[in-house]
Amino acid sequence: MEDATRARQLRNNPTDAETALWQALSARKIAGVRFNRQVRIKPYFCDLVARTPRLVIEIDGGQHAESERDAVRTRYLQTRGYRVIRFWNNEVLGNLDGVVAEIERVLATIPSPSPSRKRKGNEPG
């Protein structure tokens, strides 16, 4: 299946937990950070990704408990410069405010990118 088709399929069929967290994060509601859903970081599709701070959020169901595949996936994404945080579906659905607070806390620990250089004529003085 083509990447764009698979991503669209995943976006159109989210879990209840993915929908709830997306509503809390969309439209730059958290620290002004833009998140995207079902982003392809080959060979994986990631639930939620903030590209600039390089943060991946995975929302997992019970099938992910003690998953070595998830550990491999996390290590792979980390080698690509992403920080990965995971939440259980029931955690998102039962404690959305706590999950959002944890995401805010993690975002606050990620250094912001260097500001672009000032253009000539913009210096104070």
Image (cartoon, helix red, strand yellow):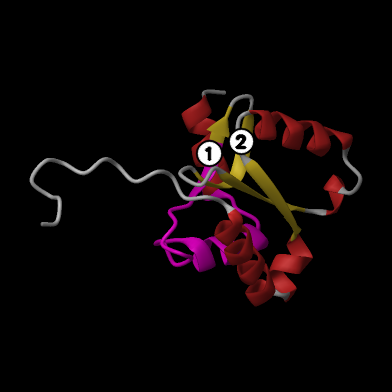
- Relative to 17, say whether 120 is above or below: above
The label number, if any, that marks residue 39 in the structure image? 1
- Relative to 78, say whether 27 is above or below: below
Residue occupying image coordinates x 68% and y 74%: 98
Residue 66 picture location, percent across and down: 91, 45
Residue occupying image coordinates x 15% and y 41%: 119
Check disc 2 and give the amino acid type. Phe
Locate the N terminus and report the quarter of the image it occupies: top right
Q: Which of 65 and 28 is in front in this view?
A: 28
Residue 44 picture location, percent across and down: 64, 31
Which one is earlier in the sequence, the residue at label 2 or at label 1? 1
Q: Nearer the viewer, residue 53 or 86?
A: 53
Dot 1 falls on a residue whose secondary structure is strand
Residue 17 picture location, percent across and down: 66, 62
Locate the C terminus and report the quarter of the image it occupies: bottom left
Q: Is residue 55 left or right of residue 117?
A: right
Q: In which quarter of the image is residue 93?
A: bottom right
Check disc 1 and give the amino acid type. Val
The reply to whether dot 2 and dot 1 touch (C-beta < 8 Å) is yes
- Relative to 77, say whether 107 is above or below: below
Q: How crowded is mark 1: few (under 14 residues within 10 Å), some or many (20 or more)?
A: many
Residue occupying image coordinates x 63% and y 58%: 106
Dot 2 falls on a residue whose secondary structure is strand
Q: Quadrant of residue 67?
A: top right
Q: Which of 88 and 105 is in front in this view?
A: 105
Compute the Cα span from label 2 to label 1.
5 Å
Determine which residue is flagged by label 2. 45
Q: Is residue 26 magenta?
A: yes
